[in-house]
Amino acid sequence: MLIVATIVILGLSAFALLRLAGPRQLDLADDYWPGKRATITVERGITYAKADPAQRYDLYSPAGFARNCTAGSHPTLIFFHGGSWRDGDRASYGFVGRAFAERGFHVVVADYRKMPGARFPAFVEDAAAAIAYVHRNLPPCADPQRLYVSGHSAGAHIAMLAVLDPKWLAAQKLDSALVAGIIGLAGPYDFYPFTSDAARAALGQWPEPHETQPIHYARGDAPPLLLLSGDADTTVKPRNSRLLAKTITEKGGPALVRFYEGITHSGIVMAIARPFRGKAPVIDDIIAFTKAPRP
């Protein structure tokens, strides 16, 4: 009888897992994956702006950091999730927060306004507001010289625009010098004319389409870039990372590109979750980037 009950419970759990959206599945799988892990703390729902309930983030930190750390001992990583400027939420990406908090980072997993209620440039304004708020309210013992901005897919597009186009941080009375580096995972950086319904809906109403493209703002004095992409990504072609890196370096700026063999668009973020870390060294490459001397 016990065996039957166990099978039923496992079957119902598997069914419930399959009904969840992809990132939620990853987060649940990561959270329950067996193995030793470092203790972390989580502070949820921190408000970085007050115009919309979506303008919040969750903060993941190494446990005991406020008691045991020395000043400037922890880098901070801000992460913007993907979802075609329409889907996703910060709660589904706890696996990103846990992965890097266990390695000594303060991790900000930020939400932002999305379609259909918000279109370009609302989500880029939100990214700049989140960056500014974190910069001004760094957790105890965070290193102000090691604030990194990152994102996956649409989140990478948002992160890249918020830092490369000077006007968004300028609106917060700041500039990109506060950012130690930008990390893009499978980001669209040069994708006009728009070929997807999501891009047309989110960006197509803007009268100057080039202003929606991060590559338009490539500049030699930008913070260092780390651009990660899978060579099997058919959703956001790897050429986006290749072209942005090429344009930045031609202008004298630092840009590092990594292409992962056989990795798809979702596979690159999956590689951050515990069950799938063998797919690609995404975590190791990001950490190595943050430890490299800043030009």
Image (tube, rainbow, N blue to C red):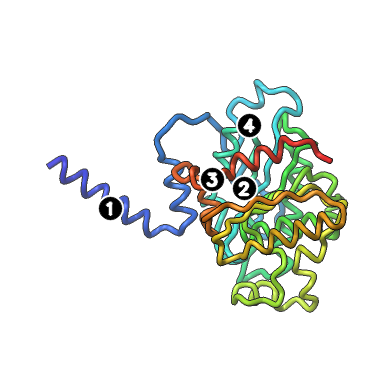
**Which residue is labeled 1 in the image?**
12
Quadrant for the N terminus, please. Answer: top left
Residue reaching furthest to the top: 68
How many residues crowd around disc 3 within 10 Å: few (fewer than 14), some, or many (20 or more)? Answer: many
Residue 97: in sight, yes or no?
yes
Residue 77 occupies which quadrant of the picture? top right
Question: Residue at horizontal 64%, vertical 49%?
Answer: 79
Circle 4 residue: 104
In the rendering, at what x and y percent does residue 103 appear? Answer: 60, 33
Position of the C terminus by quadrant:
top right
Of the image marks 4 and 2, the number of the one nearer the N terminus: 4
Farthest left residue in view: 1
Q: Is residue 246 left or right of residue 85?
A: right
Horizontal side of residue 24 vs 193, given as left or right: left
**Looking at numbered disc 1 in the image, what kind of residue is underneath it?**
Leu
Q: Mark 3 or 4 closer to N-term?
A: 4
Residue 117 image-quadrant placement? bottom right
Quickly name the residue at label 3.
272
For marks 1 and 3, the one nearer the N-term is 1
Mark 4 and mark 2: Cα distance apart in space = 15 Å
At which x and y percent is residue 191? 69, 70
Callout 2 secondary element:
strand
Q: State the CA–CA distance, disc 1 to disc 3.
A: 26 Å
Provide the residue designation for mark 2.
109
Q: Residue 83 occupies which quadrant of the picture?
A: bottom right
Label 1 or label 3, whichever lies nearer to me, is 3
Residue at 74%, 67% (x, y): give it.
121
Label 2: few (<14), some (14–19) or many (≥20) C-alpha neighbours in 10 Å: many
